[in-house]
Image (cartoon, rainbow, N blue to C red):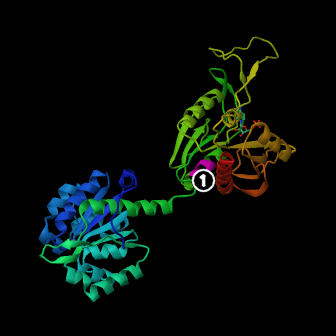
Amino acid sequence: MFQANQASFSMATLNGKNILLGITGGIAAYKSAELCRLLRKQNAVVRVVMTRGACEFISPLTFQALSGNPVHTQLLDSDAEAGMGHIELAKWPDLIIVAPATANFIAKYSQGLADDLLLTLLIASTAPVAIAPAMNQAMWSNPLTQRNIRELQTALLEQVTFLGPAEGEQACGDIGAGRMLEASELCDAVEEVLAVLLDADAGPLSGQRVVITAGPTREAIDPVRYISNHSSGKMGYALAAACAEQGADVVLVSGPVQIERPKQVKVAMVESATEMMSSVDQEIALGCDIFISAAAVADYSPVMVADQKMKKKGEDDVVLNLTQNVDIVATVAARPSKPYVVGFAAETNDVLNYAKGKLVKKNLDMIVANDVSRSDIGFNSDHNAVHIITANEIIEVPKQSKKELARSIVKSIVLNSKTRKSTTKLDKKG
Ligand code: C5P
């Protein structure tokens, strides 16, 4: 059973979270008004459901004002059902807290009864439920109440957490266990329950910032012409989505492509290699644990970019002077406190040897090699087959969709970047 303790988690846990506050008929309902206010103060979205008994103790209007939302009191109310029906309401919350929870409520919930709105939506909901009991000490210690609590905890082990009760003086004058926790303790406890759930949900890259380059670059010749390549950007975008799936904070620095932006990924669009380098610099300055260079950066760009469209001058041949672009991935990997750096090698022959050479030359931690001479995979295709190469191993990943492949590559990155971190720590100690 949860006991309120010192809050050591971030204030942001409640930000934007949907909290359903259920109130049953007990004198402690007055404390729930303060709980509602505190949850709102932490930017939670609060909806309140009150039982008939709760409405005897405190007015729904109080909670309407404090939550900023209409209060739900009836199961079979056609107006309320048109606004947000009980099933919708059951699906809405990130967490349900019932405070105060009476002995009667606990008894009914433990038996799966659904004879009012609160019980019905609890039975219909898969959201985590926190219960803050509030009752007279004799009612709390009654074996029937204790049995109901045990049954509820056994049946809904993963879903239900009891918050309190506290011991002390009670409204009826008795002294003992059964007092509802204070509003601030409940608010902290709700945050803690949510923080634990968020941690459990977070993927292995949670808390890590990943910067990824993707797509081609365009190197201007004049205002209407440029040098570029066939890169579609699909691999880089799939990697961004796969990293976000694993909980990373992802930034995609993308050359010009026609692909939908992955959800929960920050995208910075750029054109040239120079722009890509400065965008990467800016993002890495904000923090970067893993850098993945999937962009097909143009190796050269014109020395001079004409201000006006270049005209034909009658010559058969034109000479375009090109200069080498900065090597973005090698620049990032050359930094003293470099992130874990992953490069790509698109080769047409002797794929593994060229890729291994680049791993060493560019000081990369991993290189993903693919054979672009094959017409069924690589550029513009939805599929690819690669070799994942590190200093210690070569893993062959057979032909599959770029989405699946991205997941395999990210899995390898997770494993290898963690190992590198722990060996770096050992090196430092040694
Ligand atoms: O040398 P090559 O272009 O084959 O190396 C490929 C790897 O280097 C890729 O990861 C690519 O994104 C990166 N690269 C870069 N900047 C360049 C050229 C390549 O980051 N100017």
Q: Circle 1: is it few (<14), some (14-19), or many (20+) Cα within 10 Å?
A: many
Judge by depth and name the residue closer to the eye, 352 or 174: 174
Reply above or below: 428 against 255: below
**Relative to 336, is 207 on the left or the right?**
left
Residue 301 is situated, as x and y percent measured from the top left of the image, at 71, 24
Give me the residue at 76% from left, 18% from top.
321
Would you say residue 239 sits in the magenta stretch? yes
Q: Residue furthest right?
A: 350
Q: Amino acid at mark 1?
A: Ala
Q: Which residue is mark 1?
A: 242
Viewport quadrant of the N terminus: bottom left
| Res. 76 in view | no
Ligand 1 near label 1 (Cβ, under 8 Å)?
Answer: no
Quadrant position of residue 407: bottom right
Closest to the observer, 428 or 157? 428
Looking at the rendered structure, the number of numbered marks drawn on it comes to: 1
Left or right: 284, with 409 as reference point: left
**Image coordinates for residue 163, horizontal then vertical, percent:** 32, 70
The secondary structure that most of the magenta stretch takes on is helix
Q: Quadrant of ligand 1?
A: top right
Residue sitting nearer the eye, 139 or 96: 139
Residue 19 picture location, percent across and down? 32, 61
Taking the view exactly as shown, the residue that stands out farthest to the bottom is 143
Residue 96, magenta (yes or no): no
Against 406, is 364 above or below?
A: above
Q: Position of residue 42 (x, y in %)?
A: 31, 52
- Residue range (magenta): 238-243
> In which quadrant of the rendered view does residue 2 lie?
bottom left
The reply, left or right, for residue 221 in relation to residue 126 is right
Instruction: Name which quarter of the figure residue 95 lies in.
Output: bottom left
